[in-house]
Image (cartoon, rainbow, N blue to C red):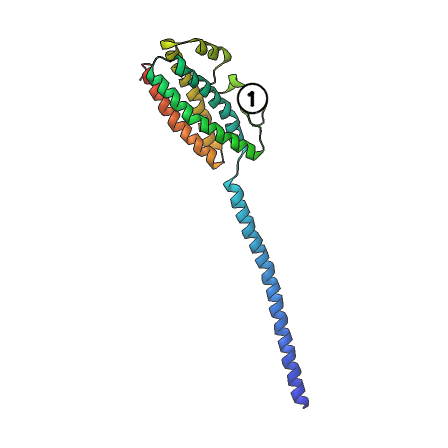
Amino acid sequence: MTVSRVLVRRAALATATATAAVVLAACGGDSDGSHSGGGSASSSASTGTHAGAHTTQDVSFAQGMIPHHRQALEMARLAAGRASSAQVKDLASRIEKAQDPEITAMTGWLRSWGEDVPASDGSMGSMPGMDHSGHSGMPGMMTVQDMDRLKKASGKDFDTMFLTMMVEHHKGAVAMATTEQDKGAYGPATSMAGGIITSQTAEITEMDKLLGKG
């Protein structure tokens, strides 16, 4: 009986030791699993953040391109009643159709980021991240005097003035979009920038030809 009890005790002790080892291993595994799980969650969150990540460059791009596009629309809308060339009118219509939705998209980005949207009158004020202050410092923007001259023109004079101004305006937009492609991080913004570069470079070539430069 004594031997039997000893054997039972040893078996119980062995079982307890094995159980403790399993528990400790499980604890260690849980700890590692939690860390690993946390790492996965962290990676997942990081990926999610990266997918929607934006930088001050993206903010600058949207805040600058909105008033830039608005001025292009203002110029384009004058063509219907003032241009004499059907080609100029068609170009102006295409510019309006392309840039109006882009303004809506960029406005949505800025609001979702909690950033300032340029005022509808086009005034920029002093917004953080802007490389240029005011219209006169932004690439390709027309001055108030330029716009007044365009509004007073009509017929062939309007056509020539519109095309000349819009070429410079487009070149400014291409420069801004190139900076966004080089330095931006937000996918939709860099994608839009690429589209602006492609479409407006093609329109510059088209306008140069209409001006007799092509």
Residue drawn at x 58%, y 33% is: 114
Between 118 and 79, the one lying in front of the other is 79
Q: Amino acid at mark 1?
A: Met
Residue drawn at x 65%, y 81% is: 10
Q: Residues within 10 Å of mark 1 (few under 14, many from 20)?
A: many
Q: Quadrant of residue 129?
A: top right
Residue annotated with mark 1: 124
Residue 126 place in picture, x, y as percent: 59, 22
Residue drawn at x 54%, y 42% is: 49
Q: How many marks?
A: 1
Between 102 and 79, the one lying in front of the other is 79
Q: Quadrant of residue 21?
A: bottom right
Image quadrant occupied by the N terminus: bottom right
Residue 194 place in picture, x, y as percent: 41, 31
Which element type, helix, strand or loop, lies under badge 1? loop
Above or below residue 140? Residue 47 is below
Above or below residue 10? Residue 190 is above
189 relative position to 85: left or right = right
Q: Residue furthest bottom?
A: 1
Between 69 and 39, the one lying in front of the other is 69
Q: Quadrant of residue 27?
A: bottom right
Between 139 and 156, the one lying in front of the other is 156
Residue drawn at x 63%, y 77% is: 14
